[in-house]
Image (cartoon, rainbow, N blue to C red):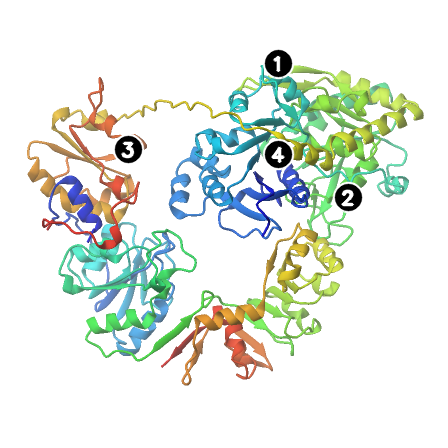
Amino acid sequence: MSHLVEVYAKDLGVKIGKPYFKPHFFPILEENYITIHNDNKVQSKEYDYWEEVVSLVKKQAPDIKFIQIGAGKEPKIKNVAKFIATPSIKQSAYIIKNALMHVGIDSLPVHIASSFDKPIVAIYAHTYASTCRPVWGSKKNHTIIESHRKGKKPSYSLSENPKSINLIRPEEIANAILKRLSKKKISRKTIFIGDKYKEEFVHVIPDNKYSLSSKKVVLRLDLLHNEENTLHLFKDNQVSIVTNKPLGDETLSQKNINCINYFSDYFDEEFIERAKKKGVSLRLFCTKEETLNEQRYKFFDIQIALIDESKKVAEAKKIVELPKKNLKIKSYTIYFKNGEAYHSLFEANGKENLDDIFVDLDKLMLYTD
Amino acid sequence: MMSRSKTKVLVQSNYSRMVTGFGKNMRNILLALYNDPDIEVVEAANGVPYGRDMHTPWESYGTYPSDQKTLSIIGKDPTKKRVAQYGFYVIDDIVEKVKPDVFLGIEDVWAFKEYEKKSWWSKTKKIIWTTLDSLPILDQAIEMEPKCDKMLVWASFAEKAMKELGHETVETVHGAVDYSHFKPLDNRGDLRKLHDLQEDFVIGFVFKNQLRKSVPNLLEGFKKFKAKNPEVSAKLLLHTDWGEKQHGWDIPRYLKEKNLEDGSVLATYVCHKCDDYFVRPYFGEEKDCSSCGSKKSVKTKNSGKGVGEKELNELYNLMDVYCHPFTSGGQELPIQEAKAAGLITLVTDYSCGTDSAYEHQGGLPLAWNEYREPSTQFIKATTCPDSICERLQQVYEMDGKSKSKLIETGKKYVQEKFSVQNAVEKLKYYIKSVEIRTKEEEKKEDEKPAISVEDFLKDVPLKDRIAVVLPRSAGDVLMANSLIENLNNLYPDKKIFFVTQPEFYDLINDNPFVHKVIPYSNSFEDLHVLEGRGDHQGLFDIAFLPHCMTQKTYSYNHNGKDKTQFKLK
């Protein structure tokens, strides 16, 4: 095993000892807490589902508090009891020293926790855990969870897309924490989490005049082309439009149009010119590979991406195998249709066509419980 | 897939959708080369991160680094960031993927600094097409010329200067700019009526950035012309951003100084809401739009919002003569646009102006005096106001026949010399015909980093100093912290200096076996500087650079499977 500290020790020709590092007092009233640390300084280390982990642990251990630590620039985990941003790492060290346990990504707080011999649950992906896992303290106190990376070797990259750290299921981390707390395991099993699972968009299929304000709205004119039912939405929302037909001047003249996503095999030149004149941001998606380069050449000043929905569904089916029963769907996206709100296109379309799950897959978390 | 029997050309320049001179040139070159049956074109786009899909009909790559490690390095060093913007850190990967027959680089010449040291450079045919706009010619261009197989320049002025220096093979290819939007309009009279200019003699100048230096001289020349011709209703249209006072370009103030606040100097106003534009004496910024009724939406044309090419052509059609006094430039697109739109052009006959200023080019030259740019000592031109006045008078008094002849000469000249087709044909010729030169000798400069750390070291004799250099990061510094006590036990007579970035001091400061913590700089990367070589005695008796195996090169990992025969704990 080639741990970093061993490389340094070999270079200096010495054995590994313990660091000299004194925490600084920081006033904290909480007891019975777990420190949690996430960071986006290195994108490939940042884990996106800590909120799921916290909520799963709290189901079985409601008295435990999670206290997020950091310098203040880290993304906030929404359901923690507190986010304590300290000006000095030595103050964070004080909070770690008084915690029941430390949970987090591969970063300095894990090493500080190990120097105090605290129980640790730490997650790794972009490099082998064996090279950077906690160094000091009893190994029995360390639960190391390493992403399976779909069988691939570590990327060693500071940035990944998609991130291999997100392949670690929330319940795996939650159960490791619960085990250290001597609590009962949870039975939840995650099947899939989409890359856009945490995006909070409201998709409106305009069969009604839905009343919404201060939302990020996606107008799905590709599913039902009714511009009349949508005009009121532009007043108080940021609106993106998905369409496969040219839009009328009244829609194009609305304020707060974020962008128009126009899907077609052959794009309508007159509509594109009108949209340009109105200064609206237009994105073109060609739905047929055969016409792609011709359309790219014709409309060179606009970037055109290829979207083939049947291929997309077929690819998605290769990634996810749906369970025969007990499937549960969670998403931050909302669909408005038939006067109701749904969490997926599949539910909005009456759960009739399983392909709707695959069309929408990047926005969903699928699990059984 | 294209067949490999085609010549594969990797073109590096501004991204083809960027609205800059180089960007427009790139767009036109690629669109034309893409349809050539003998050429397979690949775009290397400066200004776009590597890995981004640019959705071009041809294969394309961004040249800006996208991996966090390089971004982090260049983020701390403006020099590295600058070369990164020109693709220095990414171009090798692109060349490795594309394996081009020809590398065509179209940028300012410093963009290709040290490209000759790259392993692919000597194996690839390389053409550098660059802008050189001042005398003396940039040293970097003189150095680059023998290292590339063909050097092309945008202006014949630069070709002449390079040839005088003995670089005989340099040739001119003007930038490939599409001037087809610019032409004389049939409804010119109606347009002038619309903007209330039917009785006026309108002089125009389309410009931005450094050309604003020329405005006081132009105003002075215009003033002289007005004084000489009081019966003429002369108007000067300055199509530029008038609102940039914060950057020291205070055109309204110049008008006041020259007593030209009589409404004779005009600005182009654009509504940021409805895109309507109009020409009017300057009356401030952020005015209400009379067309669409929007509040504070009307401003003079600026870099964020201008007019489209159709509207710009209309503006040229409002003018009677185009006047372009400038300091120096690579191509100065508005001169050609104005000629194509049917105007006589008055141009300073320095730099690229020598391609546009004379009668056989449809222009008349403006006399100038020399001044020096303070830092580079480049010769720049300051255009004489008397000459501006004289040339305006000449055009005003010119008979219809002579005027038409000069205008037609200018239109024809732009079509022949500055067309996209002209540039593309020349490029195709060079792509197919240029022979690769023999490999150039590489020069290696001794780099002697300067370290000023004596203040930290003077209390300990050199023979007693040990350095542990670990520039970053927090976890690593804490790990190294755990080794210092044992290092001290191993060398009990020596003092340990720990070198790291100040943000990590907290992670080592408590260690009683560290004598001093020293702020890290790049100079600490060279073991010979630290430990000495030849006459140089060094700064430390022993210097450890443990990060070289973990941070500089990634040589320790071994899939996590390597073993050690001794215990390290």
| For marks 3 and 4 on the same chain, the one whose residue lies earlier in the sequence | 4
The foreground one among A27 and A130 is A130
Mark 2 is on which residue type? Glu
Q: Chain for mark 2?
A: B
* Residue A4 coordinates in the image, percent (x, y): 22, 49
Q: Do labels 3 and 1 touch, CB within 8 Å?
A: no
* Tag 4 and tag 2, C-beta contact below 8 Å: no
Locate residue A47 relative to residue B101 in the image: left or right: left
Mark 3 — residue? B525
* Rendering coords of residue B104 (x, y %): 57, 35
Q: Give the mark nearer the N terminus: 1 vs 2.
A: 1
**Residue wearing tag 1:** B164
Q: Chain of mark 4?
A: B
Marks 3,4: beta carbons within 8 A? no
Q: Nearer the viewer, mark 2 or mark 3?
A: 3
Q: Amino acid at mark 1?
A: Glu
Q: CA distance from mark 1 to mark 2?
A: 42 Å
Do the residues bearing badges 1 and 4 touch, measured as CB atoms within 8 Å? no
Query: For numbered disc 2, what is the local secondary structure?
Result: helix
Badge 1 sits on which subunit?
A: B
Q: In whole angstroms, how far apart are the C-alphas of marks 4 and 2?
A: 37 Å
Residue type at the position of mark 3:
Glu
Please give the name of the residue rendered at 15% of the width and 61% of the height, measured from the top-left corner.
A139
